[in-house]
Image: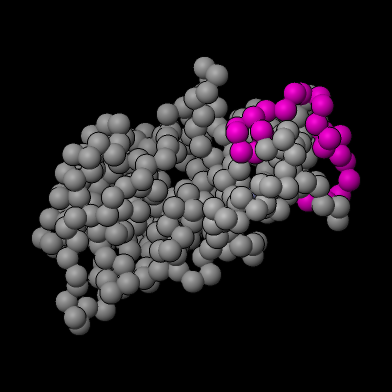
Amino acid sequence: MSEYCELPGPGSGSAIHVLPDPQFDPAPPADAREQRAVLAGGCFWCVEAVLRELDGVLAVTSGYSGGDAGSASYERVCSGGTGHAEAVEVRFDPRRIRFGQLLKVFFGVAHDPTQIDRQGNDRGRQYRSVIFCVDAQQAEVARRYIAQLDQARVFAAPIATLVEALQAFHRAEDEHQNYAARHPDQPYIAAVAAPKVAKLRRQFADWLAPGRAQSASGHDLAPLTPAQREQLAARLTPEERHVLLDHGTEPPFCGGLLHEHGAGVFACRLCALPLFVSTAKFESGSGWPSFTKPFDPAHLRQIEDHSHGMIRTEVRCARCDSHLGHVFADGPPPTGLRYCMNSLALGFQPA
Ligand SMILES: [Zn+2]
């Protein structure tokens, strides 16, 4: 058993899926104040981090479902033989968010529902995708929505999510509760959970709890309107525009920030969101400014990039969606990551 969930590899999937709303998602009874859902979608740290952001979600708890109480411990569940899946229990106000809307985020952001008994490099039945339904109506909403999404071919493969009746939910150990928020620099959280939260904030800005469009470091992550983006883009040079807006790459060893060693912050050239701190900059020898970690993981969005015959992880600004560069798993300690950025995509703000 590894100490952490595994870092993602090729095929771990952060492709962009735009899901339709569920066609069947009944209004709650007039006196409904709180409902419960139990969802398993791989590593519970990630699913919890995403669902906590939503308006109408009252509480999210990480735990285990699908096995018995005696074996519901992290160590035993991670061994894969207990029957449990890592799961989260969501308590929500159905007047503000319905069960089907939770499923839309669960399928579209929190995990990849087409993977069977795994999520990315997390492999085993404990990482299977399951909706543990608390009543017959949840099961009907879930089954109809899965059929709707499969019919619309939203995903490249059929949805593998199981729909089962909830038997029991066992709360995980305290150290696993709200893990992502408490450990933003942990490599798995930075590489896997943070991009999902960033994706949620971009795609579901209207669904976030008040204040959630801010990063933990207190910066506004509300996406730009097309007019705002156009206004900012008008200030760019043709070279900056090529990198930021057209997915370009500047030639190596030419960028103006390659040898910038002053203390300060490197921000998005388009929207000025802080992206890297000078203390995380290092000489990689690659010819591009390189960093070991972001200013705030929520400020970057990572997507799989299949261009030029390679599988790479592209890095974009989480607020304005501009292209910045790529991240590779060959960096130095403490993260082992190398954020390889274009100078043209960044602006340096001396401390
Ligand atoms: Zn930006």
Tell me where the magenta segment starts and ends, as one range: 242-265
In the rendered image, the residue lying farthest to the bottom is: 31
Residue 225, visible in the rendered structure: yes
The location of residue 240, given as percent across then percent down, is 72, 37
The location of residue 276, given as percent across then percent down, is 72, 47
The location of residue 36, given as percent across then percent down, is 26, 67
The location of residue 174, given as percent across then percent down, is 46, 62
In the rendered image, the residue lying farthest to the left is: 136
User: Would you place residue 306 above or below residue 31 in this image?
Assistant: above
Q: Is residue 23 left or right of residue 325?
A: left
Check the picture and name the quadrant holding the C terminus: bottom right
Q: How is colour applied across the structure in the image?
A: one colour
Residue 264 inside the magenta-drawn segment: yes
Q: Quadrant of residue 316?
A: top right
Q: Give the residue displayed 44% in from the left and 53% down from the top.
A: 203
Nearer the observer, 249 or 127: 249
Residue 40, visible in the rendered structure: no
Q: Give the residue displayed 31% in from the left and 53% down from the top.
A: 104
User: Would you place residue 205 above or below residue 127 in this image?
Assistant: below
Q: How many labels, in total?
A: 0
In the rendered image, the residue lying farthest to the right is: 262
Q: Main secondary structure of the magenta part?
A: loop
Check the picture and name the quadrant holding the N terminus: top left
Q: Give the residue displayed 49% in from the left and 71% down from the top.
A: 210
